[in-house]
Image (tube, rainbow, N blue to C red):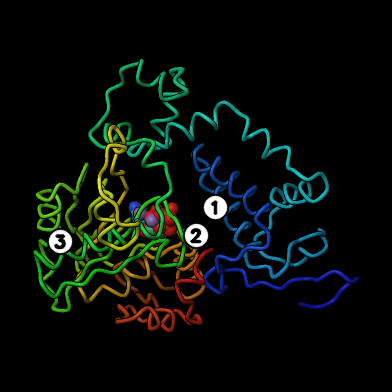
Amino acid sequence: PTNEAEVEVFSVPSYACQRRTTLENRNTVLTDALSLLAENAELSAEEGRGVAFRRAAAVLKVLPEPVTDMTQLRGLPCLGEHSLRVIKDILENGASSEVESTKQSERFKALKVLTGIFGVGAKTADRWIREGIHDLQQLKDSRPTLNRAQRAGLEHYDDINQPVSKAEADAIGQVVEEAVAAVLPGAQVTLIGGFRRGKLSGHDVDFLITHPEEGREVGLMPKIVSWLESQGFLLYQKTTRNSYLESEDGPARPCSNMDRFERCFSVFKLSEDEKRRAGQTQSRHASAEDGGRKLWRAVRVDLVVSPISQFAFALLGWTGSKLFERELRRWAGHEKTMSLSSHALYDGTQRTYLRATSEEEIFAHLGLDYIPPSERNA
Ligand code: CTP
Ligand code: MN
Ligand code: MN
Ligand code: MN
């Protein structure tokens, strides 16, 4: 930071993957506002605008002080005209009129409520809104055709929209460990996603599973799912098979964020028993007061299985944040002529795949300083 006219002027590199973004954020008022506009853009199929707001918010997240004056933002990357206008509005008036009117808008409120149903994306929500459906009651009354995921999503709506705590994530981790140990001893479970970045709550819990011997992980997911189902832990699951073949698929496609691992999107039934066994809640016995009280909650859980040869890429690709991942791929493509996915890193200049057994090696291949998970909260 250099001194200029007595306000602190900040200097920030332009890619989020060049920066250390912890959970400590001195500018939450500004970043919440920009994130809301990003969310609104994403829900309105304006992905480009969404990314622009996300990038702007991410820059503010790394500033060491609260922004108090527009002159402090001079020379910062990723702050477009629109984001600057929003920031200026908040600094001058305490709030952004655009953010406030978005929050109040019937369309935004309806999009939020309807996409809060697991299995419902922006497209489906938009179609329902055009049919005059704005809330869950109207949706139920209209007797829509729902797929299996959406039916589970509607049934467990309140639970799924309640944040998952770290304690709950750990309790689910113990169940997943138990499942994996039962069906393939020696297989390893790693917590990924937001909880690996040190977040204290999340919208779901994500796990990556591998085995130190290449090939032993083949067909593992259905076995894990069967075990979990037999123990009554799954309210919903959809498993998709691994479809990645380096030879057939060629280089990791630079702008693709889809991966082809064996994976499972699920809704877990987490009971007080598991939380207690994980040592998270006070030991207590069922009593008369429990009559009618629900002793479990539904939690969204994502499971991914990767072969050990791709583990480092999967770990890096599934730890997030989503913007950090996007920026890594943009850096690889635009600055290094490389192509990064959750499976591989392809060097377009040398026309070869670059191997890695750790995240550190991947950052080194990319010519980036290593950023630990807790500093990937862009
Ligand atoms: N991811 C992915 N493909 C998907 C969904 C997610 O590669 N279809 C990756 C994301 O890029 C992210 C990670 O999986 O790196 C976790 O995604 P998600 O659970 O959606 O977000 P979190 O960062 O874990 O945040 P939250 O606490 O809200 O769950
Ligand atoms: Mn997650
Ligand atoms: Mn997830
Ligand atoms: Mn691109």
Single out the residue that lies furthest toward the right.
5
Q: Is residue 38 visible?
A: yes
Q: Are marks 3 and 1 in contact (CB under 8 Å)?
A: no
Q: CA distance from mark 3 to mark 2?
A: 32 Å
Q: Earlier in the sequence, mark 3 or mark 1?
A: 1
Reading the image, the residue beneath label 3 is 179
Residue 51 image label: 1
Q: The residue tagged with tag 3: helix, strand or loop?
A: helix
Residue 323 image label: 2
**Looking at the figure, which quarter contains the C terminus?**
bottom right
Q: The residue tagged with tag 1: helix, strand or loop?
A: helix
Q: Is residue 92 left or right of residue 284?
A: right
Query: In percent of the image, x 20 and y 65: which residue is there?
Result: 177
Query: In percent of the image, x 33 and y 78: which residue is there?
Result: 351
Single out the residue that lies furthest toward the front.
288
Q: Are marks 2 and 1 in contact (CB under 8 Å)?
A: yes
Q: Is the CB atom of the residue marked by disc 1 within 8 angstroms of ligand 4's nearest atom?
A: no
